[in-house]
Image (cartoon, helix red, strand yellow):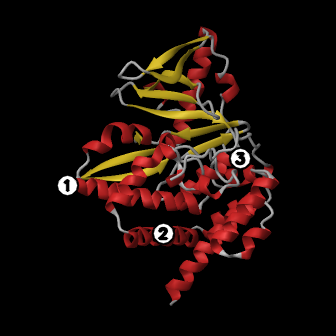
């Protein structure tokens, strides 16, 4: 565990390239929507959104002029329909846009849209953000390599993401982990080890506690937990290897301590091997789509030459594989990491 500052500076936004746009269109990630991120910025006023404890959430609720609100509501309902259904207009009469919230914290400054079904009062959320190539690659890699599927859409400079339900990691650490049983704490420790390994292998950085959620699932006489990333802004950007390992962020210290208290080194190594094997199997099962994505990423720019060189050097020191020192950009670095994991899995599997 370290206290040093791991993130160097605010990450710039990288445009979505023509090649990546073609990939998104091929796999139904691209759409022609009627509202953009810039359209939502034209709100007339806002009020602070407070949580159940009357604390500032750092979100504000936006209000639009009457002339614009009707157009924006209709477009947002249509976007929801495309994201979650077949895109027909059959459901639109039963949907209501209950809130448009704007986040004033962090790099992405997203809009959070609350959609309610007026027939049963059920509601869900989705997010409207600026399209950033790093984030798009992160979302697609999450879909391909993690245990979780995710829906998102891209059009021009706008990114639409579905909401990932769960307890924010910082909230779980502050309010929930103390009430967990010993068996639940052991299972959470296992999941954190696997989550840590998964982020490391696919080079997803900045997994501080508020950038992932803990998802409890009731199963007969016990509660099981999963840990899932919700922020993909720092996909393959930073040059320091530790940025891609959640265990090194001080915000995750209680999770790390829980692992130390409940898992032996042999168990930790076993769970890491399990996660590497699962990622390798997903790579093998999605080869065509994965190769297409890596082709885009190798030709793209999502970081600086200095950070690429630093990460390649640190990975070379970690693995002793000379390919990392020869990587030209972050796409090549990631492809070499995944190839290294898959190659070692296949070698052991054949033996």
| Contact (Cβ within 8 Å) of mark 2 with mark 3 | no
Residue 289 placement (x, y as % from top left): 64, 63
Q: Residue at x 60, y 27 (%)?
A: 75
Residue 58 placement (x, y as % from top left): 52, 24
| Res 187 quadrant in image | bottom left
Task: Report the front residue among 220 and 191.
Answer: 191
Q: N-terminal of the two: label 3 or label 1? A: 3
Task: Report the front residue among 96 and 260.
Answer: 260
Task: Report the front residue among 152 and 317.
Answer: 317
Q: N-terminal of the two: label 2 or label 3? A: 3
Q: Residue at x 52, y 67 (%)?
A: 279
In the rendered structure, find residue 133 and report the number of the disc placed on it.
3
Where does label 2 land, which residue? 278
- Judge from the rendering whether residue 75 lies leftward or rightward of residue 149; answer left or right: right
Q: CA distance from mark 2 to mark 3?
A: 26 Å
- Judge from the rendering whether residue 150 lies leftward or rightward of residue 184; answer left or right: right
Q: Element under label 3?
A: helix
Check the image and report above or below for 8 versus 200.
Answer: above
Q: Residue at x 62, y 30 (%)?
A: 109
Q: Is residue 292 visible?
A: no
Where does label 1 land, which residue? 220
Q: Is residue 178 visible?
A: yes
Q: Element under label 2?
A: helix
């Amino acid at each position: 565990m370290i206290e040093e500052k791991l993130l160097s500076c605010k990450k710039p936004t990288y445009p979505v390239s023509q090649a990546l746009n073609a990939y998104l269109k091929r796999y139904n990630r691209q759409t022609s929507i009627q509202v953009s991120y810039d359209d939502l910025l034209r709100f007339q006023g806002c009020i602070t959104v407070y949580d159940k404890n009357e604390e500032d959430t750092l979100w504000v609720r936006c209000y639009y002029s009457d002339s614009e609100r009707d157009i924006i509501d209709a477009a947002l309902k249509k976007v929801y329909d495309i994201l979650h259904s077949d895109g027909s207009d059959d459901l639109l009469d039963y949907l209501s846009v209950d809130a448009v919230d704007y986040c004033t914290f962090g790099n992405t400054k997203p809009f959070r849209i609350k959609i309610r079904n007026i027939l049963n009062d059920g509601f869900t959320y989705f997010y409207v953000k600026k399209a950033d190539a790093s984030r798009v690659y992160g979302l697609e890699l999450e879909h391909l390599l993690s245990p979780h599927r995710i829906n998102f859409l891209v059009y021009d400079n706008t990114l639409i993401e579905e909401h990932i339900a769960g307890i924010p990691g910082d909230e779980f650490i502050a309010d929930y982990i103390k009430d967990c049983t010993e068996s639940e704490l052991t299972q959470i420790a296992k999941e954190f080890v696997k989550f840590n390994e998964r982020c490391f292998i696919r080079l997803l950085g900045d997994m501080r506690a508020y950038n992932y959620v803990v998802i409890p699932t009731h199963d007969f006489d016990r509660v099981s937990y999963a840990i899932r990333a919700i922020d993909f802004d720092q996909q393959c950007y930073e040059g320091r290897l530790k940025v891609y390992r959640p265990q090194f962020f001080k915000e995750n210290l209680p999770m790390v301590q829980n692992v130390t208290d409940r898992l032996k080194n042999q168990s930790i190594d076993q769970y890491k091997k399990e996660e590497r094997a699962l990622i390798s199997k997903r790579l093998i099962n999605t080869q065509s789509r994965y190769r297409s994505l890596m082709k885009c990423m190798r030709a793209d720019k999502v970081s600086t030459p200095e950070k690429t060189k630093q990460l390649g050097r640190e990975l070379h020191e970690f693995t002793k594989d000379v390919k990392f020192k020869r990587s030209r950009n972050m796409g090549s670095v990631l492809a070499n990491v995944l190839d290294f994991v898959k190659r070692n899995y296949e070698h052991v599997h054949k033996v």
